[in-house]
Amino acid sequence: MHIFLSISSKLLQSKSTSFKSLTWIPTIFLLSPKQMSQSTSIPRNQQRIRDHGYDDYMEVEKKIRKVMKFQELLLTQPNSMIAISRLDMLARRFGFKQYEAGKFILKFPHVFEVFEHPVQRILYCRLTRKSLLQIEQEKLALLAQLPQAVTRLRKLLLLSNTGRLRLEHVRIARKDFGLPDDFEFSVVLKYPKYFRLFDAKETRNKYIEVVERDPRLTVCAVENVREREYREKGGEEENVRFSFRVNFPPGFKIGKYYKIAVWKWQRLPYWLPYEDISGYDLRSLEAQKRMEKRAVATIHELLSLTVEKKITLERIAHFRLAMDLPKKLKDFLLQHQGIFYISTRGNQGKLHTVFLREAYRKGELIEPNELYLARRRLAELVLLSPRKVIVDRRLINYGKQGGEDEIADYVENGGDHSAARETVREDLGEESLDSDDDCSIDSDGDCSIDTDGDCSIDTEYTHKEANNDDVTDDAEDTRVTDV
């Protein structure tokens, strides 16, 4: 009885029964009909879930980018070698501080070789034989896949609304699409039946335009995947017709309503990336949903055209206006973490690398190509232990003398590498690049090929313009502010 009187007195003391005091009402009745309908749609703002397989890949890629900058710097020097003191000064353009360049190259003895000049008695740096073989192999693989690169560039131009793209934007992403450094002359101007190069009157920028739309090039990579899966696994046609491969990262929480939202989104029809949508009315809600899914398909096709099935988010932003992509690309891609993965590793968080998840398994490309394998050889050299270099040199130089005389002959001859070009090409055709049957390395790391005369590897084929362009690629990517 006492408890009943205390409860009734508290009810009489309340002077107002506002809506805020009714806290016992379930929240589902307080939601508007529009909010209730969004419960089975993919959330807009999602937290990024890390996948360590891709992050570890980018940690190695971070080292490779710095190594490649040093390689390009050495190849532009006379005789492909440079004094350590001068290297320390030139490396500051890459972000290195004083004395950091020397410590960096000593970490990778399979790529860089430090030796003492026999006359000047100062330390010099040059590339090792394995590193030069890897560069030569990558060059040959790039030339061999040039027809495929022409097809990639044609499809890339067809992805744009007007069939044209800025030459500068394509130049920045040329390595991602397997294009050579001089692609403006070796690809665009060499094939006038496919491409046309012109200057815009308004902006005075150079543009690349596709000459003719080939219907055979308007087939997306995801369509081939759907057809192959439908033939192998079967299933309902409506579930496969507009679907994408979804593989969520470990630890991604998938609730009941999120599964329903993904199932509804997979069955949603959309306009193909190569389809002309200029005649459609895009003001309705249904049209906006189709355009969002079309943007996913466009980025999916863009990643499929790259050599390594990855590209930085900042370079995708260069094509945003030409391909009708949304403004906030990062938030947009985080809604589809089962299709794409965004990694912030590799450049102190300044760049974001977008991976196509279905193309990778355990951090490796499922269907590698020759250019990808040639580039990964550099990663193998970077990851090799420095102790293996010491053991190999001791085994090869066992019982051999006169190592310093060979280094002196190498420097006095000016590093003439013209005689070994054909020998390198023959070595690249074999199964192993590390065969030491016809080579010997002295105590200081010099390499000589046992033919009729001493010779080494020619590195004069590199272009000085490529070094100047690639050094500024990362700086140009970070200028994009609308991501």
Image (tube, rainbow, N blue to C red):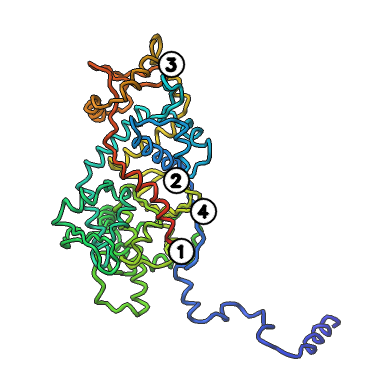
Q: Of discs 2 and 3, which sits in the foreground?
A: 3
Q: Of discs 3 and 1, which sits in the foreground?
A: 3
Residue placed at 32% from the left, 44% from the top?
466
**Mark closer to the chain start, 2 or 3:** 2
Residue at the disc numbered 3: 394
Mark pair 2, 3: CA separation: 34 Å
Evaluate if marks 2 and 3 touch, with contact meaning CB atoms under 8 Å apart: no
**Whether residue 410 is situated above or below residue 327 in the rendered picture:** above
Residue placed at 27% from the left, 26% from the top?
417
User: In front here: 185 or 134?
Assistant: 185
- The image quarter in which residue 145 lies: top left
User: In front here: 97 or 444?
Assistant: 97
Residue at the disc numbered 1: 331
**Mark closer to the chain start, 4 or 2:** 2
What is the secondary structure assignment of the residue under circle 3?
helix
Q: Of discs 3 and 4, which sits in the foreground?
A: 3
**Mark closer to the chain start, 3 or 1:** 1
Residue placed at 31% from the left, 66% from the top?
322
Residue type at numbered disc 3: Arg
What is the secondary structure assignment of the residue under circle 1?
helix
Which percent across, then down, holds residue 64?
A: 42, 40
Mark pair 2, 1: CA separation: 21 Å
Which percent across, then down, holds residue 18?
A: 68, 87
Crowding at mark 2 (Cα within 10 Å: few <14, some 14-19, many 20+): some
Residue type at numbered disc 2: Met
Mark pair 4, 1: CA separation: 19 Å
Residue at the disc numbered 4: 251
Rendered image: mark on residue 58: 2
- The image quarter in which residue 396 lies: top left
Evaluate if marks 3 and 1 touch, with contact meaning CB atoms under 8 Å apart: no
